[in-house]
Image (tube, grey):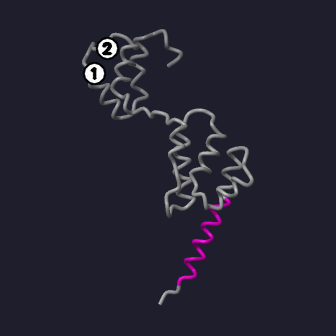
Amino acid sequence: MAIYSKNEALMCKIFPSNLEPIAMRWFDGLRVESINSFHELTQAFDSRFVTCRRVPKSVASLLSLHMQEGENLKTYSNRYWEMFNEVEGDFDEVAINTFKLGLSSEHGLRKSLTGKPVTNMRQLMDRIDKYKRVEEDQQQRKGKDKVVP
């Protein structure tokens, strides 16, 4: 479309080629001659589909995350990374600290991160993976220890 950006009529004709079915139904439902320029078309589109935009989360969202009682590390880290991926910007140091603070004070990973801090996200993820494997091994051993009558 960038090639044809000076030709508004052509831009309006090309516009629907990138639309998904719901947006295409909206486009097909526009009244004839209700749009007079490509700018008007994009404004109408933005107005109609503004609710479909993902609003980036703030760093403060990470501060609200905490490991729930009885929650395992895998579930907590999955929730954390989901939220982290919605935060815009480069906040590695904040992410490392908020992840650690979200763990219960008795969790082995929190103690490990306090005693031997990580300096980047890769190190944090490696340490999390190590502790997730430990938890999974413990869960498997508990399952084997149960005696079925």
- Determine crowd level at label 1: few under 14, some 14-19, many 20+ residues with C-alpha closer than 10 A: few
Secondary structure type for disc 1: loop
> Which comes before the other along the chain, label 2 or label 1?
1
Residue 32 placement (x, y as % from top left): 26, 16
Residue occupying the point 50% across, 41% down: 61
Stretch in magenta: 130-146
- Determine crowd level at label 2: few under 14, some 14-19, many 20+ residues with C-alpha closer than 10 A: some
Secondary structure type for disc 2: loop
Position of residue 5 in the picture relative to residue 32 (left or right)? right
Residue beneath label 2, please? Answer: 35
- Three-letter code, disc 2: Ile
Position of residue 101 in the picture relative to residue 148 (left or right)? right
Q: Quadrant of residue 46?
A: top left
Residue beneath label 1, please? Answer: 30
Q: Residue furthest bottom?
A: 149
Query: Can you say whether 108 is above or below 102 in the image?
Result: below
Q: Main secondary structure of the magenta part?
A: helix
Does the stretch in magenta take in 89?
Answer: no
Q: How many marks?
A: 2
Query: Can you say whether 144 is above or below 4 in the image?
Result: below
Residues 102 and 86: in front is: 102
Query: Can you say whether 83 is above or below 46 in the image?
Result: below
Residue occupying the point 52% across, 38% down: 60
- How much space separates mark 2 and mark 1, taking CA atoms? 8 Å
Q: Quadrant of residue 109?
A: bottom right
Residues 28 and 102: in front is: 102
